[in-house]
Image (tube, grey):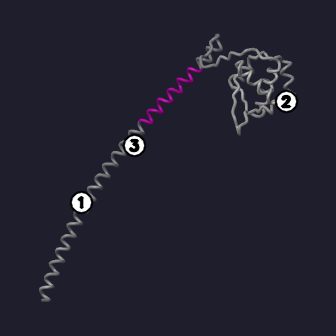
Amino acid sequence: MIVILNEFFKQRKRSFFKRQRNVDKELKGAFLKIKKEFEEHLQAINENTNEIQSNYECLCEIEAKIDKLAERMDKIQLFLQSNSSFIAEDQKAFEIKPLTKTEQQVFMVLYALEDEKGMVSYADISRKTALSDDIISNYITSMIGKGIPILKKYINSRPFLKLDQEFKTLQAKENLLMIDPAQKELVNF
């Protein structure tokens, strides 16, 4: 009986190792298949990366050429502006109605305070002009209606004012509002 059992266990053992070898071969085959798929996927990623890199380089070259063209256009525009009455289309044309003396004063205070503070509140203008906040608000609204590009920004429900930078530059160069030099002196206190 022991011999029979011994023989039975030997056959079981051989059968078990055969199955294990078959499973090992199947696993190795499956892993090799997965490894091959990963290598193909990696190769595709590398090819896409190379394509993306070449597209990026091409875009950089195009951007550099566009920048050069923009610089040349700016030079041409400056030349035309300095040698003729050419006005570029992108410059804003401000259509402004004449301001009253008080509106001019409020404007000059806004102009001067903006240089100091950046954003200006009604209270800031009120302190300099001795007018109430409500009256300042009315004058600002009137000036906006007359074409003065005043930008309003609300911070904590309080309006803050700022002049359009391009308008401010033009005002400094060309005195679009025809403000008296005496009025300017009143603001420089």
* Secondary structure state at the residue bearing disc 2: helix
Q: Is residue 150 within the magenta segment?
A: no
Question: Where is residue 39 shown, x and y percent of the image?
Answer: 31, 51
Q: Position of residue 177 (x, y in %)?
A: 76, 17
Taking 52 as reference, is 84 above or below it? above
Three-letter amino acid code at disc 3? Thr
Gap in angstroms between the C-alphas marked 3 and 1: 30 Å
User: Looking at the picture, how far across and down is residue 154, in whole percent?
Assistant: 69, 35
90 versus 161 height, above or below: above
The residue where tag 2 is placed is 128
* Amino acid at pointer 1: Gly
What whole-number distance in Å separates the C-alpha atoms at marks 3 and 2?
Answer: 63 Å
**Where does the C terminus fall, quadrant-wise?**
top right
Q: Nearer the viewer, mark 3 or mark 1?
A: 1
The residue indicated by pointer 1 is: 29
Q: Local crowd at mark 2 within 10 Å, few (<14), some, or many (≥20)?
A: some
Mark 3 / mark 1, whichever is N-terminal: 1
- Span highlighted in magenta in the image: 55-74
- Residue type beneath disc 2: Lys
Instruction: Please give left or right for residue 30 compared with residue 53 in the image.
Output: left
In the rendered structure, find residue 49 and report the number of the disc placed on it. 3
Give the percent coordinates (x, y) of residue 138.
77, 25
